[in-house]
Amino acid sequence: MKSREKIFIWGAGGHGRVLLNILRERKEYQVIGFIDNDPKLKNKIIDGVKVIGDETVLPLLKKRGVKAGIAGIGDNQKRCQIAHHIKERGFSLINAIDPKSIIVPNVLLGEDVTIWAGTVINAHAKIGDNTIINCGAIIEHECIIGNGVHIGPGAKLAGRVKIGENAFVGIGTTVIEGRQIGKNSIIGAGAIVLSDIPDNVVAVGVPAKIIKKLKNK
């Protein structure tokens, strides 16, 4: 029997725990531990896996033959920073794709991508790096999802929708065909997006309307 590649999850909170379950179901990787910079979590056992320490343990992991990891952080900006840090330390980034998701073969996936149970991703969609596609989301044909995006549970994106980098699309949101959501923007839960949303704003409601401008990141 082929041995599974050893990997770590950076982040021992809720998102990291979901990643652990996904990776266990896939049976492609052996999760050797969590990394977390919260000193209170060190040596704790979470769902049968130890929090082995903070980022200072990375050189030790490399000596043990660990070559890859994944960022288990829900916050878009922090997740991208951690993924970059993992690569800077000489590790590769894996994807965590729940076997209960449906992804057609011609979808293009980046790295450090998490796709949760019940998700459907259709023809010629592109999913950027460090992206979360949460439970039950529908990403229709030719959608382009930028780096660092989080698509919330049950969100529905019609064909040819474009989501800018680091945007957050809330639970139950609907985006009609061909619309664009700008980078860093936040779409509130249950919104229906009928027109384009610019960069760095918060939009909510039916139809979605801008209620706040955010500082440029």
Image (cartoon, grey):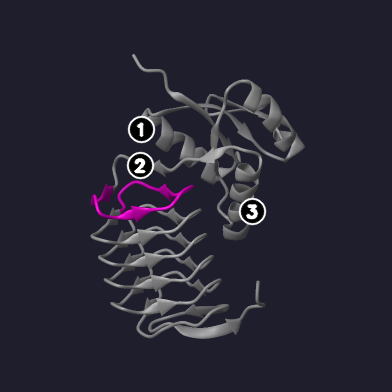
At 48% from the left and 72% from the top, the residue drawn is 188
Q: Secondary structure at mark 3?
A: helix
Helix, strand or loop for disc 1: helix
According to the picture, the residue beneath numbered tag 1 turns out to be 26
| The one of 107 and 37 positioned closer to us in this rendering | 107
Tell me the residue at 35%/83% (across/down).
194
Q: 10 Å neighbourhood of mark 3: few (<14), some, or many (≥20)?
A: few
Q: Position of residue 203 (x, y in %)?
A: 50, 79
Q: CA distance from mark 3 to mark 1?
A: 26 Å
Q: Residue furthest top?
A: 1
Between the C-alphas of marks 2 and 3, the distance is 24 Å
What residue is pinned by disc 3? Answer: 81
Q: Which residues are magenta?
A: 102-119
Q: Which mark is residue 53?
A: none
Amino acid at dot 2: Asp
Q: Residue at x 46, y 82 (%)?
A: 197
Closer to the camera in the image, 147 or 179: 147
Q: Which residue is mark 2?
A: 98
Secondary structure beneath dot 2 equals loop
Name the kind of residue labelled 3 in the image. Answer: Gln
Work out how far the residue at label 1 is from the one at label 2, CA to CA, in angstroms: 7 Å
